[in-house]
Amino acid sequence: MITVLTGSSAGIGAAAALDLANRGHQLVLVGRSSERLDGVASAVERASGSLPETFSADFASFDDVRRLAERLRDRHERIDVLVNNAGMMTLKREITADGHEAMMQVNHLSPFLLTNLLLDRVGRVVTTSSRAGRTGALDPGDLSRERRRWSGWLQYGDTKQANALFTVALAARGVAATCIHPGVLRTGFAAETFFMTLVHRVPGMGEPVEAGGARLAALADQEGESGRFYHKDRIVNVPARMSDPVLAAQLWEASLTAVGL
Ligand SMILES: NC(=O)c1ccc[n+]([C@@H]2O[C@H](COP(=O)([O-])OP(=O)(O)OC[C@H]3O[C@@H](n4cnc5c(N)ncnc54)[C@H](OP(=O)(O)O)[C@@H]3O)[C@@H](O)[C@H]2O)c1
């Protein structure tokens, strides 16, 4: 089973990589920092006896994502599972060279582009969303919140809502796709925020990263129920903003335009 795992250089992705390797997946690790990726690849080799391939790409750049897709296509005629896990959260409003708010590009538009460029050879798609998507108020006509109030958490919520809607839209196209809230986990994620400071310091607020890695790995390892949102290890109903097929179709169209497909 060939599994491409983005955001595998740290956090939940790195933990999931070890878990998936132990489940016998042949891993293809994708991250931004090649140094950190090499460290995870060595840990996977120690755990499983085989060294995974690694590819680095910055999801803040569509050119990088296109190059990544080409290299993956050159190497693999078939990808059984694509795990879109790379993601970030920042309190600063940053616009990428491609002209999009950075979280929207890294968390949604780049995984959307990568998935579409690999779609003819991917068996199923698993995306790391978040319960933060419940607070999203995504407007397909204003993905970067240029015309609406901006805050880091509002924008992050929009991107995680987009992850859930992307899953719905993929399923509507007949692609096996699921997404997951992996739990609140003590990782390097959103390090500048008060909330994550509490998660790291207050006992019981967060879980060890391995818990989230195990949940993501378990979902990547199963067929799952296409189009559905998994909260940790069970399917839950989510608000219409994360499951409405009409909104999902509008987001798909807006995303095609945004990534230039
Ligand atoms: N932690 C939580 O409580 C929590 C809860 C719900 C959902 N999530 C979601 O879980 C996913 C993983 O987060 P995490 O907690 O594991 O955070 P993390 O420890 O910060 O790891 C994030 C991963 O994404 C990669 N990444 C970040 N920006 C990137 C970029 N511009 N281009 C390519 N890769 C990039 C990082 O690569 P580098 O190592 O190169 O930076 C790293 O591999 C995210 O989608 C996040 O939204 C997290």
Image (tube, rainbow, N blue to C red):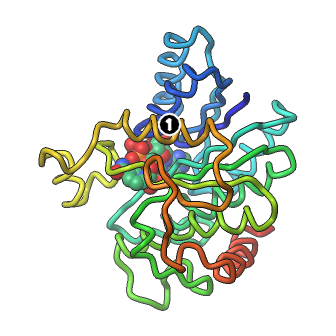
| Viewer-proximal residue among 79 and 236 | 236
Q: Is residue 113 above or below residue 159?
A: above
Q: Is residue 170 above or below residue 144?
A: above
| Viewer-proximal residue among 108 and 173 | 173
Label 1 sits on a secondary structure element that is loop
Q: Position of residue 44 (x, y in %)?
A: 52, 19
Q: Position of residue 235 (x, y in %)?
A: 52, 56
| Viewer-proximal residue among 84 and 89 | 84
Q: Position of residue 123 (x, y in %)?
A: 78, 44
Amino acid at pointer 1: Ser
Q: Residue at x 54, y 73 (%)?
A: 242
Quarter where residue 23 is shown: top right
Q: Residues within 10 Å of mark 1 (few under 14, many from 20)?
A: some
Q: Residue at x 16, y 54 (%)?
A: 198
Quarter where residue 209 is shown: top left
Q: Residue at x 71, y 59 (%)?
A: 113
- Quarter occupied by the N terminus: top right
225 on left or right of 233: right
Disc 1: which residue: 33
Q: Is residue 91 above or below residue 33?
A: below
- Quarter occupied by the C terminus: bottom right
* Badge 1 residue CB within 8 Å of ligand 1: yes
